[in-house]
Amino acid sequence: MEKLKRLAINEEGFIFDPVSGNSFTTNRVGLWILQKLKEGKTPEEIISELPGYFEVDAETAERDVTDFLEQLRHYKLI
Amino acid sequence: MKEPYEKPLIKKVQVGLSNKFGSVYGRHLRPEIDGVPISDLVSRFGSPLFVFSERRLREKYRQIYQMFSTRYPNVHFSWSYKTNYLDAICAILHQEGETAEVVSEFEYEKARRLGVPGSEIIFNGPYKPISALKRAVQEGALINIDHFDEIYDLEDIAEELGNSIKVGIRLNMDTGISPQWTRFGFNLESGQALDAAKRIVSGGKLILSGLHCHLGTFLLEPRAYAKAIEKMVDFAYELEDNFGLKIEYLDIGGGFPSRNRLKGIYLSPEIAVPPMEDFAEAICDTLLSKLKPNDFPKLILETGRAIVDEAGFLITTVHASKRLPDGTRSYVVDAGVNILFTAFWYNFKVELEEDIPGPAEPCIIYGPLCMNIDVVAENVQLPPLPRGTRLIFSPVGAYNVTQWMQFIRYRPAVVLVGEDGQVDVIREAETLDDVINRERLPERLVLKMS
Ligand SMILES: Cc1ncc(COP(=O)(O)O)c(C=O)c1O
């Protein structure tokens, strides 16, 4: 998750990668996950914490977090 | 207090490269079909489900009929069975006044069984078995001949029955469009059509009384029809002058487009597809300017797609979602290309039953078949769809419920929403019995499992 540390993330969900020059937008839940990742949480921890913060069941949380991580991987952000 | 949830998404910001086709997703919603909620339809009849709208079908027919009948005094429509031969659909169009246009003994029998008299059937196509031809002759059907061998077959039948038979011939010709469907009928430019006429006249057993052609399908060029009419009228008068015949009808076939989006055409159908009036005008104006005064041969139209396509919808349900290695979001729905044959050439309109929050991204929609070709829609801008979301595909009324096949899965039910909102099943969903009823297992192969 080293790459994540260099990202500039504002609270509106705008993300700037100073190395590649790319920028991204994410939504509130995406932002929350990114912050947890930056704090060094593992995907498993994030999945188990997500239903405590948002109106979502554990199964959806698992599926969506997994999917979100795939998106991050696709953009080479992790 | 927990916060409301939305599916986490991240999107790359494209600088200076905006997507022309709906980067902002103007959400297309279809909570109901003619007043019947999608959720009611699915809870009563399941998913996937084909839904036809009687109101849309009748209205479309009447609109198109009016466009032609207000421009030419002798217009007649014949329903192209292959486009959709469900009894209920055919019955509606026969009620509206269409005769039946069939291209096989199966379609012929289906029309007869439905109550259409032989004299109201047009029998077309390159393969008419002798027994089918004979029945059609005896029942007074109008036969458009496709090739020389059929001339000989009909002469034999005339001989056997001891009377002469009125026939038409199918023509193919250059109208400026490609591909030219030269494999059907007699070619005009090469002189083959004239040879066919000569042969018919010299045989003395058949009476040539009509000309038929069908240029292709989903044609976007009204001028091609004007050209065809021009050539047909010239040819009709050439025949009348040289052989003392009377050409009583000109059958221009079908081929008019529906408001669907062909693959490879990115303009919306509202822009890319010429209005039906343009076709009616091209055909009727050319007729009126080419025909001799007071000569109004019957104009027959066999339009299929343009009448029924927009009356049909397919309700599907999202079963799973997956992100592909290249980052594309994909969904698996419960309806595949085995029941949505026209997915191979159309980009359908894909509508949501209800609004779903979240940013849209281009998605690919797969069917349930375990086959790589099972792609029902590509590049559709959709928000993140939860499992169970209903997607409504349209227009799907033409060719799907005839060209569909039982493959891997059963074919689903088809329902008709009536003009008063009542819903009738017009074809039941298939079961295992439908598939195995025709199978026979030799005794020696019966499995003996303990
Ligand atoms: C002889 C004939 N008539 C009519 C049609 C109906 O065509 P469409 O559905 O394009 O109007 C066809 C379709 O192939 C045809 O072959």
Image (spheres, coloured by chain):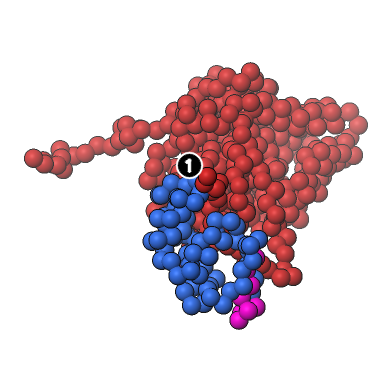
Chain colours: A blue, B red
Q: Is residue A19 magenta?
A: yes
In percent of width and height, residue B18 lies at 72, 64
Quadrant hosting residue A15: bottom right
Numbered range of the magenta stretch: A14-21
Q: Residues within 10 Å of mark 1 (few under 14, many from 20)?
A: few
**Residue at point 53% right, 31% down?**
B39
Q: Amino acid at mark 1?
A: Gly
Q: Is residue B446 magenta?
A: no
Q: Which residue is mark 1?
A: B388
Secondary structure mainly formed by the magenta segment? loop
Image vertical order of residue B222 relative to residue B74, above or below: below
Q: Is residue B91 left or right of residue B65?
A: left
**Residue at point 69% right, 42% down?**
B258
**Residue at point 53% right, 34% down?**
B50
Give B339 or B268, whichever is nearer the viewer: B268
Q: Is residue B156 left or right of residue B408?
A: right
Give B276 or B411, whichever is nearer the viewer: B411
The answer, for residue B88, to whether it is visible in the render is yes
